Image (cartoon, grey):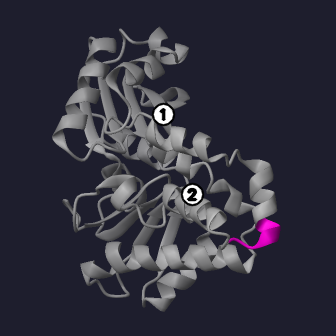
Amino acid sequence: MILIADGGSTKADWIAIDTTNKTELFRTRTLGLNPAIVPAEELHNRIINMFQLIQVKDQVEEIHFYGAGCGTPNPVQILKEVLESIFVNAKVVIDEDMLAAVYAASGKKPAIVCILGTGSNSCYFNGEKMEMLVPSLGYILMDEASGNYFGKRLIIDYYYNIMPKNIAEKFKEEFNLDADYIKKNLYRASNPNMYLASFAKFMFDFKEDKYIKRIIKKGFQEFFKYRVLPYNKTSETPVYFIGSIAHYFRDILEKIAVKNNLKVTDVIQRPIDKLLKYHKNNIN
């Protein structure tokens, strides 16, 4: 049995494959497993609390985990040790979520591949390996146009009275905007990036409002400026986007791409199904 996991900061999708006949056995979902943010003990708890995974833990021969926060050695080692302590018979392979996005989007063909979910990132895949502009420094310094980027923007605009009154009223109804509560979640609780991203869902209901459109356009343009245009690729280069932010605001995203002389080839909300196909094709 092989387990494939696409692990974001908010959630992780898992699929089990029977290696004998290459069929899907089951799929499940856990809370996010970003080892750069979530402590090892909590990573362990989030996995063992999922009955379907624990039920087959001794039968798993391989785990292919693609995750947010898995782009540098230390977080990868933390997660690897957690997984090996649970799935004691499995060979564990961990790669960053960017590689899963590449496999799901372009397969083995050259393309620019971008993630716009809880966090954001991009790469150019030349058909053999990924080329990245800079390492991602996460939600505090980077993550342009991500869920946590927009969540941050909404909170700031609300507190500075920049948000239009009609939207501010709805925003206040939907979220606990007490200053102490916000600061507790940002500076003392786990997963502050996921907390910030939870505000972004508010934009989906107001996507036709001028204010919401403006901040989305600005965020997308920043993403193209720092994460797409520096690759210096022509308009013929396929450009793929992965994630819910890209999915729900695809129409705006496509317009910003055209403005920058590029074209969005496809938007994939959840890459796990195409990742499954990729791994099935590579089972010996």
Residue 37 seen from this side: yes
Residue 161, placed above or below residue 233: above
Mark sitting earlier along the chain (1/2): 2
Residue closer to the observer: 258 or 116: 116
Amino acid on which the number 1 mark rests in the picture: Ala
- Point out residue 111 in the picture as x, y percentages from the top left corner: 33, 70
Q: Mark 2 points at which residue?
A: 151
Q: Is mark 1 on a helix, strand or loop?
A: loop
Q: Residue 121's quadrant in the figure? A: bottom left
Amino acid on which the number 2 mark rests in the picture: Gly
Residue drawn 43% across and 68% down?
Answer: 240
- Point out residue 3 in the picture as x, y percentages from the top left corner: 39, 27
Residue drawn 42% across and 77% down?
Answer: 222
Dot 1, how many residues are within 10 Å of its Cα: few (below 14), some (14-19), or many (20+)? few
Q: Residue 66's quadrant in the figure? A: top left
Residue closer to the observer: 217 or 5: 217
- Point out residue 271 in the picture as x, y percentages from the top left corner: 48, 50
Residue drawn 49% across and 52% down?
Answer: 118
Residue drawn 62% across and 80% down?
Answer: 214
**In the image, which disc is placed on residue 189?**
1
Q: Nearer the viewer, mark 1 or mark 2?
A: 1
Q: Does the magenta stretch include residue 166?
A: yes
Q: What element carries label 2?
A: helix
Q: Does the magenta stretch include residue 73?
A: no
Residue closer to the observer: 89 or 279: 89
Does the CB distance between marks 1 and 2 fall below 8 Å?
no
**In the image, which disc is placed on residue 58?**
none
The part of the chain drawn in magenta is 163-167
Dot 2, how many residues are within 10 Å of its Cα: few (below 14), some (14-19), or many (20+)? many
State left or right for residue 101 relative to residue 32: left
Main secondary structure type of the part rendered in magenta: helix
